[in-house]
Amino acid sequence: MKKLSLAVLLLLSPCFAQAWPWSRDMANQISIKPQESPDPANPGMYPFPSRSVPVPGTTVFVEDLDAAKKMANPVVADAKSIQKGKHLFEIYCTPCHGFKGYGDGLVGKKLIMQPFNLSYTNTMHSWQSPDYPDGYIFGYMTLGGAVMPSYANDLSPTERWNVVNYVRKVLQKAPAGYVAPQSN
């Protein structure tokens, strides 16, 4: 009986010390919460502008991938667009696709389905095919895919077109003399 009483006391002792594991919630910590201000003199977030209306949903303006394929790229693939696209690609795409677009990023290696190889070395298909126009890449970024999330809320349409320009003009541009290996 003494052993049982001792065991019960040991099991209940954390309760009395308020040290149950679930009594420590990460939401109850000393940090700035969403919509709070770090300045005690100005508590809360800035109020919304008068007569403003929040817009629900995402910024997807394309119905599906077939509709996206028909879209023409409205952003000229100049040096400025390509540089912006490179910067955005490095932020949003390299975790899965890698810096060269091979689909070998640190996150991409851990996925069950390998991310698309966006480079000129892709042996599954040619990116220059009419089956994969600029709108296809734009639509895939907008709508997402099997393992790829939608970036419609993260990147504006112009930013997505800049990424398309970077992928097309840098990653998919084969060096002179490059001969693609034949797929089996």
Image (cartoon, rainbow, N blue to C red):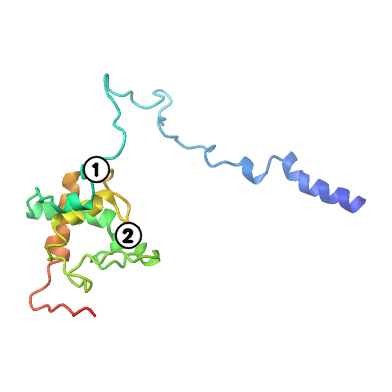
Q: Which image quarter: residue 92?
A: bottom left
Mark 1 secondary-structure assignment: loop
Whether residue 26 is visible, yes or no, is: yes
Identify the residue shown where x is 31% and y is 37%: 57
Kindly report the distance in space between the C-alpha atoms of the residues bearing marks 2 and 1: 23 Å
Label for residue 95? 2
Identify the residue shown where x is 77% and y is 44%: 12
Q: Earlier in the sequence, mark 2 or mark 1?
A: 1
Identify the residue shown where x is 18% and y is 47%: 159
- The spot of residue 88 in percent (x, y) is 22, 52
Amino acid type shown at disc 2: Pro
Q: Is residue 139 above or below residue 102?
A: above
- The spot of residue 129 in percent (x, y) is 13, 66
Query: Which is more toward the observer, 184 or 163?
Result: 184
Amino acid type shown at disc 1: Val
Query: Which is more toward the observer, 163 or 130?
Result: 130
Q: In this figure, what is the number of numbered marks? A: 2
Mark 2 secondary-structure assignment: helix
